[in-house]
Amino acid sequence: MRRYALEIPISAEVETWLNEVRYFAGNIPFILIGNKLDLIETIGRVIDKQQAEEFARRKNSIYIETSAKTGKNVDDAFIEFTRLIINSVEAK
């Protein structure tokens, strides 16, 4: 899992980090998590959700938005990550 704050755009740092992970660990399950979903109502959306989903798709990953403050989608992120790990193990 890789988390970033929704109030800032997906940076080159995220892409570099993911490329390094994939280089050393192969095609392991990966979820890009946009956190601080609760701030969207206050500050507005900085990154387009479709853009983030497309970025994740290009990287053979999935994208989920969460709020640690409210707990929204946090359980879903862990459930999805667990599902990806199980599917990865079963495929081997």
Image: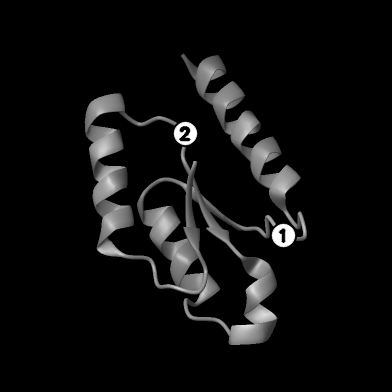
Percent across and percent down for residue 82 are 63, 30
Spatial CA distance of label 1 from label 2 is 25 Å
| Rendered view: 24 above or below 18 | above
Query: Which residue position is annotated with label 2?
Result: 29
Identity of the amino acid at label 2? Pro
Tag shown at residue 7: none
Horizontal and vertical percent position of residue 1: 49, 41
Vertical position of residue 44 compared to residue 28: above or below? below
Q: Residue at x 29, y 46 (%)?
A: 17
Q: Position of residue 57 (x, y in %)?
A: 43, 54
Nearest the viewer among 22 and 9 is: 9
Where residue 64 appears, as percent x and y from the top left, is 60, 55
| Observer-nearest of 44 and 91 | 44
- Circle 1 residue: 69
Q: Report the number of numbered marks.
A: 2
User: Circle 1: is it few (<14), some (14-19), or many (20+) Cα within 10 Å?
Assistant: few
Callout 1–callout 2 Cβ contact below 8 Å:
no
Mark 1, secondary structure of its residue: loop
